[in-house]
Image (cartoon, helix red, strand yellow):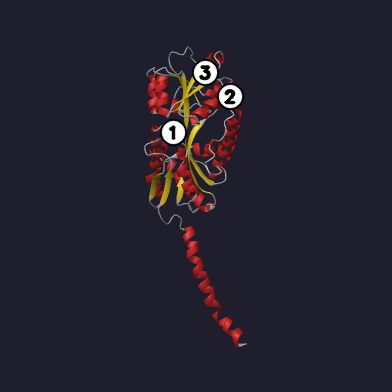
């Protein structure tokens, strides 16, 4: 009886102690973020991915009330940064700002070391940057249908420049070739700069290159002839240039930038980051910075991003299989 009475007397104390130990954990989770957040950019400073990250840095600091650190972990075509985030704690404090490359890398590299659809938690698509199909002015075509006919008459002779053997521009050119029914000769250069210079010099005939103020200037000056833009619809990033899908129905290939977290990051943390980023992307000054870099601000839900990458992953897998490109 004494034991029972003792237990009854101390039960409220034990309950209070239990609640007090649970309270800090619950408060910590609810208080996200309670420390600085690191956005890992898997490419060098100065590129478009880095520009997108820094356009968001100050607005996110104000919205979330925490320091936002931009950490450029470049190397291995983005794999170093991706693996770093994959192996980080799934708590929302270390996130990755990649482009399509992180989705494509496991399809073309045996050393990727992650599953593009399972190793990360989608947060939000930040922006998209379409490409423009341009030719050297000496090519006797005035529109995309004429180019397709011209290339069909010259199988494996009509030259397309690319910025690397398995770059996004190369794979997009391969996708265009498959959909258009042509067999171009792909000439790989080390980066977008050299491939653009090759077309300007007339070394190669055509190129799919991302939109930018520089590209628009070269087109307006007549040094390049624009035949189509790779977005599904017309875009202000390439004013007056028709979508390539007008001549090749269903064709679309856009470079996009997004935020993703390690797989297993709590849904409430993902949602809080998503809401903050969408708020930042709605700011006119952020949209203008992205537009000046050649990208158009987007936003949306984690679920919308998940659906997008699942469909795109399947599409690129099909392109690679048809081109007989295997992981190296």
Asked where in the image residue 152 lies, by quadrant, the reply is top right
> Could you tell me if residue 101 is visible in this image?
yes
Q: Secondary structure at mark 3?
A: helix
Q: Which mark is residue 178?
A: 2
Q: Which mark is residue 295?
A: 1
Residue 136, position as x, y percentages in the image: 43, 17
For the C terminus, the quadrant is: top right
Q: Secondary structure at mark 2?
A: helix
Name the residue at 43% across, 45% down.
40
Residue 10, position as x, y percentages in the image: 54, 80
Asked where in the image residue 192 lies, by quadrant, the reply is top left
202 to 162, vertically: above or below: above
Is disc 1 in contact with disc 3, using a CB cutoff of under 8 Å? Answer: no
Asked where in the image residue 326 lies, by quadrant, the reply is top right
Residues 181 and 227: in front is 181
12 to 199, vertically: above or below: below
């Amino acid at each position: 009886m004494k034991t029972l009475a003792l237990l009854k007397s101390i039960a409220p104390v034990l309950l209070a102690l239990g609640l007090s130990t649970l309270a800090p954990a619950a408060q910590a989770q609810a208080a996200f973020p309670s420390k600085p957040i690191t956005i890992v950019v898997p490419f060098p400073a100065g590129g478009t991915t880095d520009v997108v990250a820094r356009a968001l840095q100050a607005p996110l600091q104000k919205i979330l009330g925490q320091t936002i650190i931009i950490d450029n972990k470049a190397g291995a075509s983005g794999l170093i940064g991706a693996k770093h985030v994959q192996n980080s704690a799934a708590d929302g404090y270390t996130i990755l700002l990649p482009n399509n490359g992180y989705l494509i890398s496991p399809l073309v590299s045996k050393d990727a070391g992650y599953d593009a659809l399972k190793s990360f938690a989608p947060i939000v698509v930040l922006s998209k940057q379409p490409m423009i199909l341009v030719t050297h002015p000496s090519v006797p075509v005035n529109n995309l249908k004429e180019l397709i006919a011209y290339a069909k008459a010259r199988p494996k002779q009509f030259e397309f420049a690319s910025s690397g053997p398995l770059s996004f521009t190369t794979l997009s050119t391969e996708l265009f070739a498959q959909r258009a029914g042509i067999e171009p000769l792909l000439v790989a250069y080390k980066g977008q700069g050299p491939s653009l210079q090759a077309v300007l010099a007339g070394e190669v005939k055509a190129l799919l290159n991302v939109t930018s103020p520089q590209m628009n200037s070269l087109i307006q000056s007549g040094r390049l002839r624009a035949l189509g833009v790779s977005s599904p619809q017309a875009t202000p990033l390439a004013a007056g240039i028709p979508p390539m899908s007008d001549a090749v129905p269903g064709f679309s290939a856009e470079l996009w930038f997004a935020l993703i977290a390690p797989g297993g990051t709590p849904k409430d943390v993902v949602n809080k980051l998503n809401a903050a980023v969408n708020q930042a992307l709605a700011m006119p000054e952020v949209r203008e910075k992205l537009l000046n870099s050649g990208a158009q601000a987007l936003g949306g839900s984690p679920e919308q991003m998940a659906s997008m990458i699942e469909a795109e992953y399947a599409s690129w897998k099909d392109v690679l299989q048809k081109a007989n490109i295997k992981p190296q």
